[in-house]
Amino acid sequence: MYGKFLVEGDKLVRELLASSFKVDAIFKTSSWNYANQRDKIELIEVSEEDLRKISTHENPNQVLAVAHIPARNTEILENPLANGLYLACDKLSDPGNAGTLIRTADWFGVENIFFSENSVDIFNPKVVSAAKGSLFRVACHYVDLKQIFSSNAHLPVYGAYMDGKSIYKYPVNQNAILVIGNEANGIGEELAPYITQRISIPNFGGAESLNAAVAAGIILGEFRRAIE
């Protein structure tokens, strides 16, 4: 509604200030100092009790910032994607999963993530917290995934399925889009025609399924291992 979101805690606020995100205000206790604070940011000192009242955390860590949600990047839909590894998330709904997935993508050097428009809000406080600063480095886009796939036929689309080919045995292309589906229902049937290869992580034990972010990390690790 206001186009803004909260960033909480010393480490995350420092990462925010090191990014290009626009910051409106910082609410801090007397114990928090940051020598290289940007110009033109309102700095408001509050008591620990007042910080606790405005925070979404039970035990806030010294500081809270109000930042602007960046405008959508429409150029990424208007031009073919450059070669590289991309991540696409279909109807991802769990905030913790989304934040961990963004952090995982950052670890493996994935610079762009496409979320279907009915996915979780990535500026939800739980997502921001779980992403651990990676939200400020990885570009996240809400898009029509079918449009992304159809307009970038030069990139193979790998879909993570329970019944796909083993990622440990299937040679992968470093220029590709990896699709991770909804935590409960997987990748939607409407996207099936765009998936060029169904891949899976073999099950060696008794667990029914893997967390979406964990699955993405394992698969991205295999993509990157292929170039080592």
Image (tube, rainbow, N blue to C red):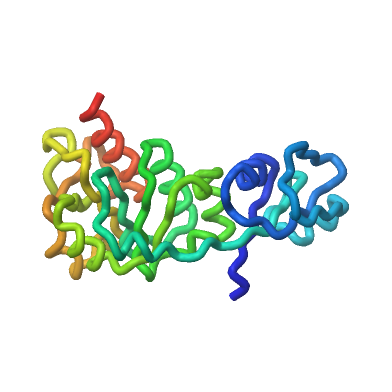
Across the whole image, how many numbered discs are drawn on residues? 0
Q: Position of residue 29 (x, y in %)?
A: 83, 47
Q: Residue at x 22, y 35 (%)?
A: 204
Q: Position of residue 6 (x, y in %)?
A: 64, 58
Residue 173 appears in which quarter of the rendering?
A: top left
Of residues 16 and 107, the one drawn nearer to the viewer in this rendering: 16
Q: Residue furthest bottom?
A: 1
Query: Is 17 on the left-hand or right-hand side of 90?
Result: right
Residue 183 appearing in the image = no
Q: Residue furthest top?
A: 228
The C terminus: image quadrant:
top left
Of residues 92 and 74, the one drawn nearer to the viewer in this rendering: 74
Residue 40 appearing in the image = yes
Query: Is 168 on the left-hand or right-hand side of 206?
Result: left
Q: Position of residue 126 (x, y in %)?
A: 56, 55
Q: Residue at x 65, y 46 (%)?
A: 17
Of residues 99 and 57, the one drawn nearer to the viewer in this rendering: 99
The N terminus: image quadrant:
bottom right
Against 18, is 169 above or below? above
Q: Residue at x 59, y 69 (%)?
A: 3
Q: Position of residue 69 (x, y in %)?
A: 56, 62
Query: Is 170 on the left-hand or right-hand side of 101?
Result: left
Q: Residue at x 37, y 53 (%)?
A: 113
Residue 179 appears in which quarter of the rendering?
A: bottom left
